Amino acid sequence: MKEPVKEKVCVVTGASSGIGRRVAVDLAHAGARVVAVARRAERLVALVTELGGARAGHSHVVADVSRRSDVKGVARHVLEEYGRCDVLINNAGFSNRSRFGGPESVADLQAVMATNFFGTVYCTAELLPLLEASAPSTVVNVASIAGRLAATSSSYCASKFAVVGWSESVRVELASRGIHVGLVLPGPIPTEGFPQTALTRHPLLKYATGTDADVSAAIRDVIEHGKMERTVPRWYYLLRLPPIVLPPIYRLAQRRVTRRFTATGQRPTQPPDDAGAGQS
């Protein structure tokens, strides 16, 4: 059977490592034409070469999605090279793993919001004319279970809650223009930026992690079947019930998880393009 993504032009942000890289590889193998976007040029060149390069219909753009001028450059590239955009996957993001401690914390929050939230908005806005012209088309926003349950750093949760809320609202606004907006909410996914060492080494908690392949499959599900939302692993969807059904127990668990997270969390000085994207 012909793959639904075959020959579609798919823009993937945060494509230099982790979830983004896996998504780019899987889409290319399914016959899509991939535009890989990230900040690390050498990795993007290596990725596109691995996928078969321009002869196979793939390309890359070096860009920081937190800079709207860079995102405008991505849109120009897609217009000039392909003349259409069938799928946009907003995956780029990171977490600085910091506590909110006062005035000095505002800059940390702004940095995370600039990439995780406004990067998603910028990419969607600048590529919107091509998405509409290519309709039916799809936007997949990779948020996090932390966009439903506040149990990690406050800046990361704020950015992912913003992505979730904005996605649900803009989905309605863009539906009449032939553009479907879907959400993918991963739980802990070991990636280069955040290997989730404590979880993967635990005899029981290691089963609570997913893989970049799982997230990639969920993204394909959104694209191919028009799903509005996918949680990875799927059973994490049940974690959304305690805040509603058992608020006191949820608040107790939230305090414990947050304390442990901020006490042991890693804080990379130069996070990869998708560090923390989809992490909880």
Image (spheres, rainbow, N blue to C red):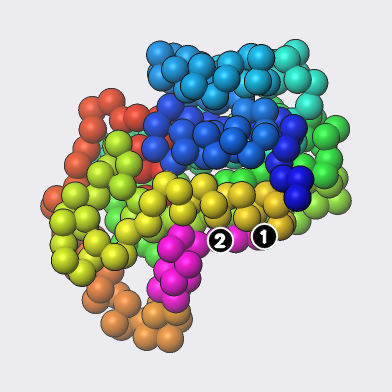
Residue at the far front in the pictured view = 1
Q: Quadrant of residue 137?
A: top right
Q: Which of 97 and 130 is in front in this view?
A: 130
Q: How many numbered marks does the figure carry?
A: 2
Q: Which of 207 and 183 is in front in this view?
A: 207
List the residue tagged with mark 2: 230
Left or right: residue 222 compared with residue 8: left
Q: Which residue is rendered at x = 61% and y = 25% of the image?
A: 35
Q: Which residue is rendered at x = 34% and y = 55% of the image?
A: 188
Q: Which residue type does callout 1 highlight?
A: Lys
Query: What percent of the width, then of the height, locates residue 89?
Result: 59, 39
Q: Measured along the vertical axis of the image, is residue 152 above or below residue 250? A: above
Q: Which residue type does callout 2 highlight?
A: Arg
Say whether residue 102 is visible. no
Range of residues picked out in magenta:
228-239
Mark 2 closeness class: few <14, some 14–19, many ≥20 residues within 10 Å: many
List the residue tagged with mark 1: 227
Q: Measured along the vertical axis of the image, is residue 240 above or below residue 108? A: below
Query: What percent of the width, then of the height, locates residue 212?
Result: 42, 47
Q: In which quarter of the image is residue 110?
A: top left
Left or right: residue 106 compared with residue 131: left
Q: Which residue is rendered at x = 48% and y = 67% of the image?
A: 234
Q: In which quarter of the image is the C terminus?
A: bottom left
Q: Which residue is rendered at x = 41% and y = 77% of the image?
A: 243
Labels 1 & 2 near each other (Cβ < 8 A): yes
Q: Nearer the viewer, residue 236 or 211?
A: 211
Query: What percent of the width, then of the height, locates residue 165?
Result: 57, 56
Check if residue 236 falls in the magenta segment. yes
Left or right: residue 202 compared with residue 77: left
Considering the numbered disc 2 on the image, is that residue within a helix, a strand or a loop? strand
